[in-house]
Amino acid sequence: MHNRFTFAVASTISGLGLGMIGAFASPTNPPWILILIYVASALLCSALPIWLVARGMERFRLRWELRWPVTGISNRGSNTPLSDRIFNVRINVDFDRLHEFLVVFNFTFFNGTDYQIVRESITGAILCRTSSRALIRLPDPHLRDSQSRTLNDPFRQFEITLEQRIAKEVTDEILGDINAGEPVSFIFTSLQLWLDRMTAGNPFQVRIWDGVSCMKKTETIICERVPDASKLTTIE
């Protein structure tokens, strides 16, 4: 559309110049009229390339304008929701305090936005699956208080830690499965983790993994991502 418009303007200006020469440049006209006609025609014809060059330089300046120092690729003008620009890259499960009936989850995220991000709140619950029972709903988890005012910078990884209390009978089942080399799964499809921009006051829910499956291999407990927990629907 822009190219057609430019061509139309060029044709009009050139046509005006040539038309003036054809209409008024007669040998019978006085010399001063012929000079005036040729000068006016030259001005009309030269206005087009000057205008095109000026517009091209302006677009070139806007396209290549850079911020200094360059700290990252800006996406402030993007229509992508903030929740789609923060990525859950890893979840670690800490069983060191299981004897205290406590499991700790460390969620690692990458902040792919231009903004400092703070944690807001958590709602919902974590589900647990052992070898002896289907999914069970655990008590409501809690965010670690020490991270309440942490500012998470743009284009950096950050962690959010959840502390999960576990009933004694479930703790015994988890310990039994781990010691026997059986998998223990934690499902997060019923968990909602809320973040916000610093001072924005508009919390949003961040995407997290469906779950993790943990199994003891030699002396190390390995936790792997559960890619799809949609089939695990039975909750006790």
Image (cartoon, rainbow, N blue to C red):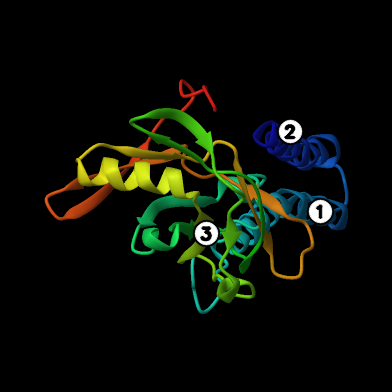
Query: Residue sitting at 36 percent across and 46 percent down?
Result: 172
| Distance Cα–Cα, label 1 vs label 2 | 20 Å
Query: Residue sitting at 77 percent across and 57 percent down?
Result: 202
Q: Which residue is mark 3?
A: 162
Badge 2 amino acid: Ala
The spot of residue 110 in percent (x, y) is 47, 58
| Label drawn at residue 40 | 1
| Snapshot quadrant of residue 120 | bottom right
Q: Are marks 1 and 2 in contact (CB under 8 Å)?
A: no
Residue 151 appearing in the image: no
| Label drawn at residue 111 | none
Q: Identify which residue, 173 or 121, lies in the foreground.
A: 173
Q: Earlier in the sequence, mark 1 or mark 2?
A: 2
Badge 3 amino acid: Leu
Q: Check the picture and name the quadrant holding the C terminus.
A: top right
Q: Which residue is mark 2?
A: 8
Q: Earlier in the sequence, mark 3 or mark 2?
A: 2
Q: Are marks 3 and 2 in contact (CB under 8 Å)?
A: no
From the viewer's perspective, is residue 86 above or below residue 72? Answer: above
The spot of residue 213 in percent (x, y) is 34, 40
Badge 1 amino acid: Ala
- Would you call the spot at circle 3 few (<14 residues within 10 Å), some (14-19), or many (20 or more)? some
Query: Is disc 2 placed on a helix, strand or loop?
Result: helix
Q: Please state which of the two labelled residues, at mark 3 or mark 1, is closer to the viewer.
A: 3
Query: Residue sitting at 26 percent across and 45 percent down?
Result: 178
Q: Please state which of the two labelled residues, at mark 1 or mark 2, is closer to the viewer.
A: 2
The spot of residue 115 in percent (x, y) is 62, 66
Horizontally, residue 88 falls left or right of residue 122, namely left
| Snapshot quadrant of residue 180 | top left
